[in-house]
Image (cartoon, rainbow, N blue to C red):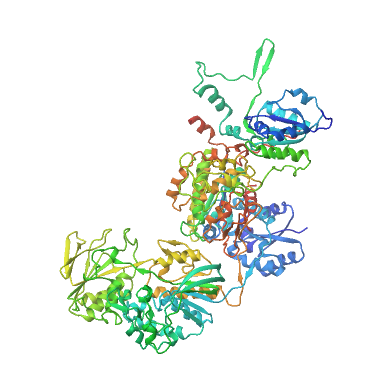
């Protein structure tokens, strides 16, 4: 029986994490092929609708990588992403989706190794969670009520 | 009765009756409308039978106003019947358009809903708590059947092809009258359109908007609001910015934050996604701990944003009407 | 009908070798409306030619490169577009090298990932729209706000490059902090000697317009085109007529405490701002002048034989149009009265660092003689470090200059009074570099004591008046109490943000943190503010010394000369946010999002408009917009969603 290969959509910001990913590639640090990158100018562009779109179109996990807080090329974009993530986590759980399927992290332009580590870690975490199914937490949550 | 009066059917499915009340609330102009049409079905107000509809030729009804969500076999059956027999099918009100309040049932399961209603509510006083409504019951006269409830509550356009949507919970009497008169005059928007404004509610709201930086969210009962200022600016979760306009800001004028009953505008795919983005973005803190504390005041976020539209969330398997 | 070009690069064989290349090509060919071609090296001349021919033939109206990172060759392919007459925004680059084969060694896995990215890239390319890169005229003139050393150096550098500069200074005289100093650390150079020749230069320079006694009143416009209204305060003197005979000063009847010298001496209402100030003329300190109390005194005017006194001067506005602004208004030296409130009474021998500087200065209240208030030289001087610094109670940071000037003052004392016992009371010493270490060693050799005491949130030392001396007490690092008396105590305080900065923040739509104006990026855009065309130099953006301030001034000049090139138009970023006024409801969420103040609310239309000049294209406001009225050019929701669907298909 073949092991489950998750599909993970990763949003990378042009100035930090996209460069960090390139840096990882330049240094030939491995990153799982399950990670499907989409470039945005700033992690602040990533809205909950994109995360939800990814999940409903077949993603098992969503990774958002931005600049470290305080370093955003556009000053404050990543702070908004951070706040949206807090509320999105709550919302996803209420919609019976495991919020651990969506992760926000910070990778700077020089952090090729971190890109490799974060993508590997997240891919394994999603592999353990298994394929995403809508209402995956519903039964358990209703039983617990 | 005039021979060529347009035939109008009004039907209520999983509904509270509010849309029908809104029709009556039109008041005197309703008499004018009523004189121009022939009602062929209006369960809440008039005594017509399903057979009257079944016996009609197809496309005999000029306008069918269908309110309420579809959650039972009967509602689905009648929706399909009315679609077959009607030229214009209108999803009338939030329930038919988006799923409405009954749609919140989709947070639960059919079994859980039944369990709550027949076992868990304090007013149930039975030893044998496992009682459930039976789909079939034999009686001396024959067999009685109850329509089966579906696992999920659906919008009207998930079971039949819909021509127009009239938003609101309920659509205001003014908007309903306007729509009926537009149909009677043959002034119809393009097929599939939602009748009313496309700009969201802030466009109509007379309150002053200063800046959107919220340090604390609160509910209407927790603190007295300033009636001249934007409610969202003040930290009340007013859904005006994500809600289609046209209602005249009735609730906001009564100091109640908008709960989003007109649903999103044409440019918003998912009202929940849009509103959580806005709410989180306007939190006035860059410190994750402080931001979490501020956002922790929001309980039941999914319930709040999807109060009228859970069956319309992006996070579901898409159900399209089966082509006959 | 024009199609989408899909150019799959073999990258000299590396991509072909690391994947099942044919499968990738087949996958591309299976997508409708595509023209799929491969080459060994699309970035090479031959490869570029292939693309160029397809564009010229009208075969494609947009294309995708399936190759290396856009960081590598976006310029190369951008040029290919331009050469073919194709809008450069009709190009999308899919990175399957750095983010493909180079991080995915297994060819099967790499192939699968690449095919997904290819589908996403083509889906996005399908939705690309040509974007116009607009240009605006820029005004080459510059305004420098703040006539301290940083502002002066910036003005001179700009004038040298042929720019016209408006140098605006709040006080009646230019110079800032430098004229207050006698020496500068670490080399003990004469401070006024640094400024004096520069001051003459800028006063003589034709392209520098000196505007003293002026502050910024209001600002409209944006980077490249500012209209700034200045408020000009009357000095009541016309400098070009004045020959500095000082007859007006002699005859002036009003005397008051001289704040420039820490109220340690007096000045007349009509007096020089400081001896040797530029412009070389006295001015009236209005609050001291009897005319401000209603008296019709004209003694100064009567005394002047050169028509240099004009008592009719009124405050008025001056409007100036410039393209860029350098803000160099400095910071305040923290007032130690806030730390030792009872002691700074003008009688106790406790002095702020700056006041002690004035005492050591030849232009100061004692003409440079280091003496106590009774006129006698001190037998002992204690210098307390970190006064009001590094504590939440006052300034929660180290200013990095106070330990250094403390050494300088110790040196001045020992030089003037070799037998004087000088003691430094410190917790840490912030002294990097060889020169400072040398100074410490020399001072120690001369008998200067360096005592390392314990510091808490109140500071390092307690001070108490003891007759005509001051008792300095505290806890040593060993925990034992320590105390001694000193004839004079000097309090080394750091830089506090000045209130002027907050006005500038409002006027220029900037941001501040703890009172200091924030720069755009602390490493690579350390003199740029968050408003395009506005630069921040000197202590305005954080505590620093003269060297760093002047360096920043030159850096800002460099930024201006390279970005706002005279005669060249400024290209605007086309990937900006835009609002559809037919959808916008005027909720103003976006206005609260933007650190660049790009969205502005139009009250009349109840809609928001995004300035194409100010918008940097981050898209944060677009994500926050509740009604779908906002769009991010080239990063529309439709485009991003098409990529999401593409990678998952």
Residue B56 seen in this snapshot: yes
Q: Position of residue C99 (x, y in %)?
A: 57, 57
Left or right: A32 in relation to C307 = right
Counting labels gives: 0
- Which residue is at the front of the view, C628 or B324? C628
Q: Quadrant of residue C381?
A: bottom left
Most extreme residue toward the top, as rendered?
B140
Q: Position of residue C277 (x, y in %)?
A: 38, 82
Residue B130 lies, with reference to residue C12, above or below; the image says above
Left or right: C545 in relation to B261 = left
Residue C43 seen in this snapshot: no
Left or right: C356 in relation to B158 = left
**Which quarter of the figure is the N terminus of chain C placed in?**
bottom right
Most extreme residue toward the right, as rendered?
B3
Left or right: C332 in relation to B171 = left
- Residue pictured at 17% horizontal, 76% vertical: C379
- Which residue is at the front of the view, B59 or B71? B59
- Which residue is at the front of the view, C315 or C38? C315
Q: Position of residue C413 (x, y in %)?
A: 23, 78
Q: Position of residue B295 (x, y in %)?
A: 47, 45
- Which residue is at the front of the view, A21 or C286? C286
């Amino acid at each position: 029986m073949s092991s489950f290969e998750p599909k993970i959509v990763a949003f990378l910001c042009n100035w930090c994490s996209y460069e960090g990913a390139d840096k990882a590639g330049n240094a030939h640090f491995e990153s799982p092929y399950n990670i499907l990158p989409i470039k945005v100018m700033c992690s602040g562009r990533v809205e909950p609708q994109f995360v939800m779109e990814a999940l409903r179109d077949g993603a098992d996990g969503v990774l958002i990588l931005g600049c470290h807080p305080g370093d955003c090329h556009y000053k404050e974009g990543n702070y908004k992403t951070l706040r949206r993530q807090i509320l999105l986590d709550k919302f996803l759980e209420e919609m019976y989706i495991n919020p651990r399927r969506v992760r926000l992290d910070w990778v700077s332009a020089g952090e090729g190794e971190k890109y490799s580590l974060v993508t590997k870690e997240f891919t394994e975490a999603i592999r353990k969670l298994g394929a995403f199914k809508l209402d995956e937490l519903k039964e358990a949550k209703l039983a617990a009520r | 009765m005039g021979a060529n009066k347009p035939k109008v059917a009004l039907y209520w499915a999983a509904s509270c009756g509010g849309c029908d009340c809104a029709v009556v609330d039109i008041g005197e102009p309703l008499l004018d409308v009523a004189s121009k049409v022939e009602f062929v079905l209006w369960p809440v107000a008039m005594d017509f039978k399903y057979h009257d509809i079944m016996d009609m030729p197809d496309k005999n009804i000029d306008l069918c106003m269908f309110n309420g969500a579809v959650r039972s076999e009967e509602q689905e059956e009648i929706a399909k019947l009315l679609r077959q027999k009607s030229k214009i099918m209108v999803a009338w009100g939030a329930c038919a358009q988006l799923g409405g309040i009954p749609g919140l049932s989709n947070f639960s399961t059919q079994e859980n809903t039944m369990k709550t209603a027949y076992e868990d509510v304090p007013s149930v006083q039975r030893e044998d708590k496992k009682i459930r409504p039976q789909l079939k019951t034999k009686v001396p006269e024959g067999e009685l059947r109850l329509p089966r409830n579906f696992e999920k509550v659906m919008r009207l356009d998930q079971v039949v092809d819909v021509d127009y949507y009239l938003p609101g919970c309920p659509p205001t009497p003014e908007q309903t009258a306007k729509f009926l008169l537009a149909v009677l005059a043959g002034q119809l928007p393009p097929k599939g359109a939602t009748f009313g404004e496309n700009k969201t509610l802030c466009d109509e709201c007379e309150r002053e908007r200063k800046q959107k930086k919220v340090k604390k969210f609160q509910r209407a009962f927790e603190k007295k609001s300033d009636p001249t200022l934007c409610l969202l600016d003040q930290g009340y979760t007013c859904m005006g910015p994500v809600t289609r306009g046209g209602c005249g800001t009735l609730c906001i004028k009564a100091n109640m934050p908008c709960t989003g009953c007109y649903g999103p505008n044409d440019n918003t795919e998912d009202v929940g996604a849009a509103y959580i983005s806005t709410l989180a973005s306007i939190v006035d803190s860059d410190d994750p701990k402080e931001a979490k504390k501020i956002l922790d005041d929001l309980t039941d976020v999914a319930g709040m944003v999807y109060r009228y539209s859970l069956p319309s969330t992006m996070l579901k398997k898409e159900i399209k009407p089966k082509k006959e | 009908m024009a199609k989408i070009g899909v150019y799959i690069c073999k990258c000299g064989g590396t991509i072909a070798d690391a994947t099942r290349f044919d499968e990738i090509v087949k996958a591309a060919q299976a997508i409708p409306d595509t023209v799929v071609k491969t080459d060994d090296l699309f970035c090479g001349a031959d490869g570029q030619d292939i693309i160029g021919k397809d564009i010229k033939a009208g075969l494609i109206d947009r294309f995708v490169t399936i190759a290396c990172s856009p960081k590598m060759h976006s310029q190369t392919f951008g040029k290919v577009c331009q050469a073919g007459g194709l809008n450069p925004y009709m190009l999308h680059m899919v990175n399957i090298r750095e983010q493909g084969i180079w991080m995915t060694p297994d060819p099967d896995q790499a192939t699968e990932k690449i095919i997904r990215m290819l589908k996403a890239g083509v889906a996005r390319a399908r939705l690309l729209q040509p974007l116009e890169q607009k240009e605006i005229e820029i005004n080459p003139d510059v305004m420098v706000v703040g006539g301290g050393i940083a502002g002066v150096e910036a003005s001179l550098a700009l004038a040298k490059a042929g720019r016209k500069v408006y140098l605006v200074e709040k006080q009646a005289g230019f110079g800032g902090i430098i004229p207050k100093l006698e020496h500068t650390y670490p080399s003990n150079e004469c401070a006024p000697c640094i400024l004096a020749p520069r001051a003459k230069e800028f006063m003589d320079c034709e392209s520098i317009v000196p505007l003293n006694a002026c502050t910024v009143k209001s600002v409209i416009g944006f980077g490249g085109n500012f209209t700034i209204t200045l408020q000009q305060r009357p000095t009541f003197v016309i400098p070009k007529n004045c020959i500095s005979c000082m007859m007006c000063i002699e005859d002036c009847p009003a005397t008051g405490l001289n704040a420039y010298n820490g109220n340690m001496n007096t000045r007349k209402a009509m007096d020089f701002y400081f001896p040797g100030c530029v412009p070389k003329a006295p001015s009236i300190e209005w609050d001291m002048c009897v005319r401000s109390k209603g008296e019709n005194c004209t003694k100064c005017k009567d005394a002047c034989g050169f028509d240099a006194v004009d008592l009719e001067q009124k405050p008025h506005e001056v409007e100036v149009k410039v393209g860029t602004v350098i803000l160099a208004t400095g910071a305040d030296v923290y007032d130690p009265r806030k730390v030792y409130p009872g002691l700074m009474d003008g009688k106790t021998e406790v002095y702020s660092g700056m006041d002690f500087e004035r005492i050591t200065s030849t232009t100061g209240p004692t003409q440079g003689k280091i003496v106590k208030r009774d006129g006698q030289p001190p037998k002992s001087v204690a210098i307390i470090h970190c006064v009001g610094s590094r504590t939440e109670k006052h300034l929660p940071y180290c200013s990095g200059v106070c330990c250094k000037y403390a050494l300088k003052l110790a040196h001045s004392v020992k030089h003037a009074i070799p037998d004087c016992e000088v003691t430094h009371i410190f917790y840490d010493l912030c002294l990097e570099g060889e020169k400072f270490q040398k100074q410490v060693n020399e001072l120690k050799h001369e008998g200067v004591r360096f005592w390392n005491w314990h510091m808490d949130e109140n500071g390092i030392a307690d001070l108490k008046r003891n007759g005509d001396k001051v008792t300095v007490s505290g806890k040593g690092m060993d925990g034992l109490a320590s105390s001694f008396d000193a004839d004079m105590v000097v309090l080394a305080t750091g830089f506090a943000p000045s209130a002027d900065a907050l006005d500038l923040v409002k006027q220029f739509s900037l941001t501040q943190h703890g009172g200091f104006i924030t720069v755009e990026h602390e490493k690579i855009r350390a003199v740029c503010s968050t408003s395009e065309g506005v630069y921040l130099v000197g202590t305005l953006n954080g505590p620093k010394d003269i060297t760093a301030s002047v360096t920043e001034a030159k850096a800002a000049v460099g930024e201006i000369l390279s970005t706002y090139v005279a005669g060249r138009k400024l290209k605007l970023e086309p990937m900006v946010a835009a609002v559809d006024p037919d959808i916008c409801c005027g909720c103003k969420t976006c206005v609260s999002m933007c650190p660049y103040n790009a969205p502005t609310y139009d009250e009349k239309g109840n809609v928001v408009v995004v300035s194409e000049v100010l918008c940097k294209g981050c898209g944060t406001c677009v994500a926050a917009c509740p009604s779908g009225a906002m769009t991010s050019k080239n990063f529309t929701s439709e485009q991003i969603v098409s990529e999401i669907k593409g990678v998952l298909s």
